[in-house]
Amino acid sequence: MEILKAENLVKYYGKGESLVKAVDHSSFSVASGEFVAIVGTSGSGKSTILNLVGGLDTPDEGRVIIDGQDISKMTQDELTVFRRRKIGFIFQNYNLVSVLNVYKNIVMPVKLDGSQVDKAYISRIMKMLGIENKRKAFPGQLSGGQQQRVAIARALAAKPSIVLADEPTGNLDSKTSQEVMGLLKMTSHEFQQTVIMITHNEEIAQMADRIIHIEDGKILGGEA
């Protein structure tokens, strides 16, 4: 079943000779439970694609449909609620709240939505990611790999329709990168979680179910 459909997305910046075609009439779809890597060099448009799919930016043309809903037609307030409930984000810089402990960081999206925390589910995620003994630790007391594990748990906490990972191993050494990627893939399969990851690292991308290449804002392959 199709969980995401990006149709003819366009995002340009600047004008005339300064015009940058960040995303240039690009389309792709992702099936429910699929782990997809979008690969491209710096400036290829992959970050812009992720921002458009995540509702963090608005396309000049085209539309994004997630779980049957066209986010392009939503107001900012509607989009804020939709993102909180339906989209999990994993960032390169972790984006953890330094004054909150690990557990509070993880359940924050659920709390912000005013929903009930599924404690058994959260404990299961933490155990799977090997951070159950770090529940009361603060981000500053953790290694980069541990912080990214917390970020993965936070992204999964609200049981979103889709998880978007922005260069999730960008700040990690190669050994830790492999460990984090293995955990991300394991949790995505365990919870039938759809994941879209952008990366410039072909080796990391090989761990995904499917690879989509992007260059100069255009999708080159894997869009089927």
Image (cartoon, rainbow, N blue to C red):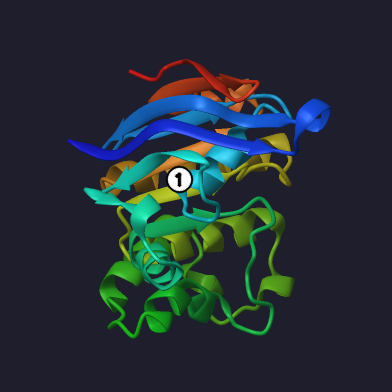
Tell me which residue sits at (74%, 73%) in the image.
Answer: 140
Q: In this view, does 125 lie above or below 119?
A: above
Most extreme residue toward the top, as rendered?
221
Question: Can you identify the residue that label 1 sits on?
Answer: 53
Most extreme residue toward the right, as rendered?
17
Quadrant housing residue 194: top left
Q: In which quarter of the image is the C terminus?
A: top left
Tell me the kind of residue under disc 1: Val
For disc 1, the neighbor class at 10 Å (few under 14, some 14 to 19, many from 20) is many
Q: Could you say where residue 31 lies in the image, as x and y percent from the top left?
A: 26, 34
Quadrant housing residue 53: top left
Q: In this view, does 18 lie above or below 155?
A: above
Residue 145 appears left or right of 35: right
Asked if one can make out residue 74 in the rendered structure from this viewpoint, the answer is: yes
Q: Could you say where residue 174 lies in the image, as x and y percent from the top left?
A: 70, 34
Most extreme residue toward the left, as rendered?
1
Tell me which residue sits at (74%, 40%) in the image.
Answer: 173
Tell me which residue sits at (36%, 69%) in the image.
Answer: 78
Tell me which residue sits at (64%, 65%) in the image.
Answer: 95
Q: Is residue 77 above or below residue 115?
A: above
Quadrant housing residue 107: bottom left
Q: Which of 162 and 64 is in front in this view?
A: 64
Q: What element carries label 1?
A: helix
